[in-house]
Image (spheres, grey):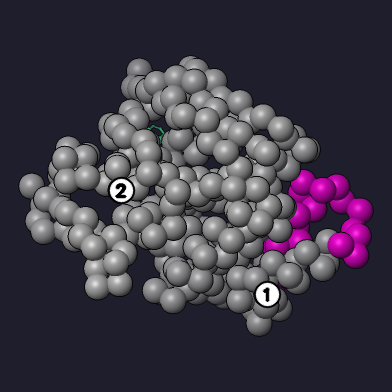
Amino acid sequence: MVVLSTDRLGVRFGSRDVLRDITLPPCDGGKVVAIVGPNAAGKSTLFRRIAALLPGPGSFSIRNVRDPARAIAYMPQDQSGSAVLTVFEAVLLARKQVSGWRLRNGDLMAVDQTLQTLGIDHLADEVLSELSGGQRQLVGLAQCLVRDPQVLLLDEPTSALDMNRQLEALSCVRGLAREKDMLVLIALHDLNLALKFADEVAILSNGTLHAFGPAANVLTPDNLATSFRVRARVESCSRGEPHLIVDEAI
Ligand SMILES: Nc1ncnc2c1ncn2[C@@H]1O[C@H](COP(=O)(O)OP(=O)(O)OP(=O)(O)O)[C@@H](O)[C@H]1O
């Protein structure tokens, strides 16, 4: 099973340490880890560091990798793009970028299946530039999933989705994580989605790791006050599920 470890990971822009000493406990395949934190806490920077798009101090390792070229898939926050490609072509291109340029039947089937899994197969022949923001976001997710990665880095993948599609997309990602032993790191601003879908939660604050652990242990009133500057509480709803209620900004 894939295992991601980080050791005092950091990123420096100019003279500024934007990310410092991020040492996460080893994260195993099959799990969903939510990375949460206020604006500018360093969530996207952490993802770009793990995706090897940024240099910096510290190190990370991924154990039990099948194929280094396709071990990690990273979905950035910004899904804007002006490529004149259909949805099918864009997802196929994403797959071919990591699996060699010779087209195989399995590639076409994988694209079809990914679009179906995310409920966007009806968009296959649409041109990317004519999609809505939410549709574009689902295509971005499809471009990651079709690569069959062992570690999936999703930077706010549901921010443009309606409530139904948020739940559908996150259920799908969690199901694939379990089925394929894939590790998913997912930046989320909606902490109720983190409570619902994440096995563990990491709170980043000012570029450092403020807390890590099961959601119930980490999303405490104290941590939420210190990191997010809100007065909030987790209550059990009428279905017995934990629900975060934010009372006020402080
Ligand atoms: N290329 C860059 N050059 C200089 N500073 C940068 C660069 N990219 C990001 N930063 C800074 O790094 C800090 C962390 O940014 P980052 O995008 O990682 O935050 P975030 O937690 O993802 O925020 P948000 O929730 O708003 O998306 C910010 O202060 C930002 O200004």
When the figure is inspected, residue 126 is found, relative to residue 107, above or below; the finding is below
Name the secondary structure under disc 2: helix
Q: Position of residue 215 (x, y in %)?
A: 34, 47
Q: Which residues are magenta?
A: 85-106
Return the x and y of residue 233 as percentages of the image width and height: 17, 54
At label 2, the amino acid type is Ala
Residue 110 as seen in the image, left or right of residue 116: right
Residue 249, given in percent of the width and then of the height, sits at 10, 52
Circle nearer the N terminus (2, 1): 1
Q: Residue at x 35, y 56 (%)?
A: 195
Residue 87 tag number: none
Which residue carries the number 1 mark?
Answer: 116
- Front in this rendered view, residue 9 or 30: 30
104 relative to 133, above or below: above
Residue 166: x and y in percent read: 44, 68
* In magenta stretch: residue 246: no
* Few, some or many residues within 10 Å of mark 2 (<14, 14–19, 20+): few
- The chief SS type of the magenta part is helix
Between 14 and 73, the one lying in front of the other is 73
Q: What amino acid is labelled 1 in the image?
A: Gln
Residue holding disc 2: 216
User: Which quadrant of the figure shows ligand 1?
Assistant: top left
Q: Is residue 91 magenta?
A: yes
Instruction: Describe residue 5's horizontal placement relative to residue 158 as left or right.
Output: right
Q: Which callout, 2 or 1, points to the residue nearer the camera?
A: 2
Q: Are marks 2 and 1 in contact (CB under 8 Å)?
A: no
